[in-house]
Structure formats: structure tokens, C-alpha cells
Amino acid sequence: MKKMLLVGIILVLSIGFSGCGPAQVQNVPKQALATNQSKITNDDVFKSILRAGAGLGWIIKAVDENTAEGTLHLRDHTAVVTISYNTKDYSITYKTSTNLGYDAENNTIHSNYNGWITNLNRAIQVQLSTL
């Protein structure tokens, strides 16, 4: 009976900790713009990205007319992404991070990073859909 209880506890703990390890870095390649407007400009797209990021705590800065850089600071963690965009689509790509356990060789990072990117992507789609 004690062995079964011990095996059960070990199984529950191993399942619980399995989600805490590193995950493959999630990039968002070429997402079509979610908008009904046909005469959208690059500035419209940038402003949508800016609003989306700001709503989630990202600091978004323009790099050039088709590229922005997003930085998210949470506690002692920092994630930096490159957001490439035009009037047809946008992409979010990992650039650098601090205290997220990024492993370039295996292309892995703390699993929370992917959630942040998913949330940013959804927020951008929402902002673009309001144009």
C-alpha cells in the first residue's frame, strides 16, 4: 500500500513539474492582417502594434518603417522581439532575453515566454481588426 501511495505521489509530481521546463521558442511568422480596411498604411499597422503591446505592458519602439522592437520587463525577466510588418502581414521573432534560460543551441526558452508571445499576437490581431 505504501509503495502504491509513493508511486502515485511521484507520478503526480512528475506531471506537475513537466510544464516547468524549457519550451521551443515560439515565433509568429507572417500573420495576415485581420482588418476589413483596404487602404491601410504601414503607420496604421504600427499604431495597432503599439496599442496592442502597451495594453500588455510591452514597450514598442519603431526601428524603421517596416520594423518595430517590443520589450517586456516582468520582475527580473526581459524579453525582446522584432516585429516586422507591412500592409499585408506581420511577424514576431525572438531577438534576445534576460533571465529566461534561452538556449540558442536547442532554441528553447522558459515556457512563459511563449504565453507572452501568444498574448501579444492575439492583441495585435484585435487591434488590427478595429481598423
Image: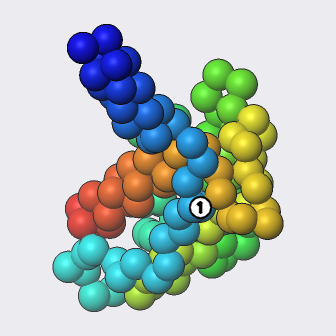
Q: Position of residue 91 (x, y in %)?
A: 52, 74
Q: Position of residue 65 (x, y in %)?
A: 66, 76
50, 43: nearer the viewer: 50
* Quadrant where the image shows the N terminus: top left
Q: Residue at x 44, y 69 (%)?
A: 44
Q: Residue furthest top?
A: 2
Q: Residue at x 78, y 63 (%)?
A: 104
Tell me which amino acid carries mark 1: Val
Q: Position of residue 18 (x, y in %)?
A: 46, 40
Q: Is residue 16 in view from this perspective?
A: no
124 left or right of 98 in image = left
8 left or right of 78 in image = left
* Quadrant where the image shows the C terminus: bottom left
Q: Which residue is mark 1?
A: 25
84 left or right of 100 in image = left
- Tell me the crowding category of disc 1: few under 14, some 14 to 19, or many 20 or more residues within 10 angstroms, Cα based: some
Q: Is residue 15 in view from this perspective?
A: yes
